[in-house]
Image (cartoon, rainbow, N blue to C red):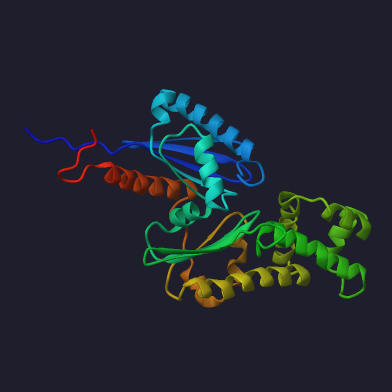
Amino acid sequence: MPMTQPSSPSVLAIDGGGTRCRIALEREDEVIRVESGAANASSNFDGTVAQIRVGLERLSAAAKLPWAELTQVPAFLGLAGVVSPEIARRLQRALPLSRTHIEDDRPAALRGALGAADGAIAHCGTGSFLASQIQGKRHIVGGWGQQLGDEASAQWLGRLALARTLDVTDGLTTATGLSASLIDRFSGAAEIVAFASQASPMEFGAFAKDVTRHAKEGDPLARNLMRQGACYIAETLPRIGWTPGQPLCLTGGLAPEYHAYLPRQMQEDLQAPQGDPVYGALALAREFAAQSHTETQPRPGQSHE
């Protein structure tokens, strides 16, 4: 009688960011996904915990898996705002999950895009970060937010477009279609300044679409802004280990717009991501589950009784 192969253990993956929280359960040959609201552990810790709980409840219902069983599944959480081990520990204490590994949201995006292969990603959404994966070692830079970084992100691009528009009102540079449209939208410089004093990253990021649209039409200001973002990517990736010939993925809503502005060698090495951050989080959850299982097995001559 042939031996049956044991089924793969179930794993749980959570990818949380400033827009939404995505939760997936992988069991046997299926993956069940649900979503809940924004989850940034630094800017809204209690809200993050609440949204994860909402997502877990939805997943429990969608998977027809009792809550007590779901909370025992090994889980990898990649969450925006996990900037220190202490925040990760606070989340572990606050969440109902019994077996968790918690990091920020960047490793899952890197693993999702590249799988286990060497290479790098430039992630530019509302925020941004760059990351490489070389011989099993990760090097991740950026992602420090609106005030301190996020170069080449949508919020960075939108904020810079407004700043350069103010240069036009000061007579320091020539008006373009992009600057004229922004001045018309705000009815002048004073309103731009008032907006910028309280704008969120998402509000700044909304203007990135204006920049990319005008850049495609040949607007010199817009094209210069796109070149600045591409220059940051092109200069930084080699500093974190990427070398020509290795795969390079542009992830996030804005990053593909920089394609035409990158050096030719980088353009030749671009490839589509293998999967999204949830795909990466599931892979990391499988690794965590295997590792934690090994660590709990008794050594020869050892008993857990």
Q: Is residue 14 above or below residue 70?
A: below
**Along the horizontal axis of the image, is 117 left or right of 121?**
left
Q: Count numbered badges in the picture.
A: 0
Residue name at image x 59 percent, y 32 percent: 50
Q: Is residue 139 above or below residue 93?
A: below
Task: Report if residue 289 is visible in the image.
Answer: yes
The quarter of the image holding the C terminus is top left
Q: Is residue 67 above or below residue 148?
A: above
- Residue 286, given in percent of the width and then of the height, sits at 35, 45
**Along the horizontal axis of the image, is 299 left or right of 227?**
left
Of 161 and 267, nearer the camera is 161
Of 112 and 102, nearer the camera is 102
- Residue 99, given in percent of the width and then of the height, sits at 40, 38
Task: Report if residue 177 is visible in the image.
Answer: no
> Residue furthest toward the left?
1
The quarter of the image holding the N terminus is top left
**Along the horizontal axis of the image, is 207 left or right of 197?**
left
Of 144 and 87, nearer the camera is 87
Residue name at image x 50 percent, y 76 percent: 265
Classify residue 188 by image quadrant.
bottom right
- Residue 304, given in percent of the width and then of the height, sits at 24, 36
- Residue 174, given in percent of the width and then of the height, sits at 87, 74
Residue name at image x 68 percent, y 57 percent: 154
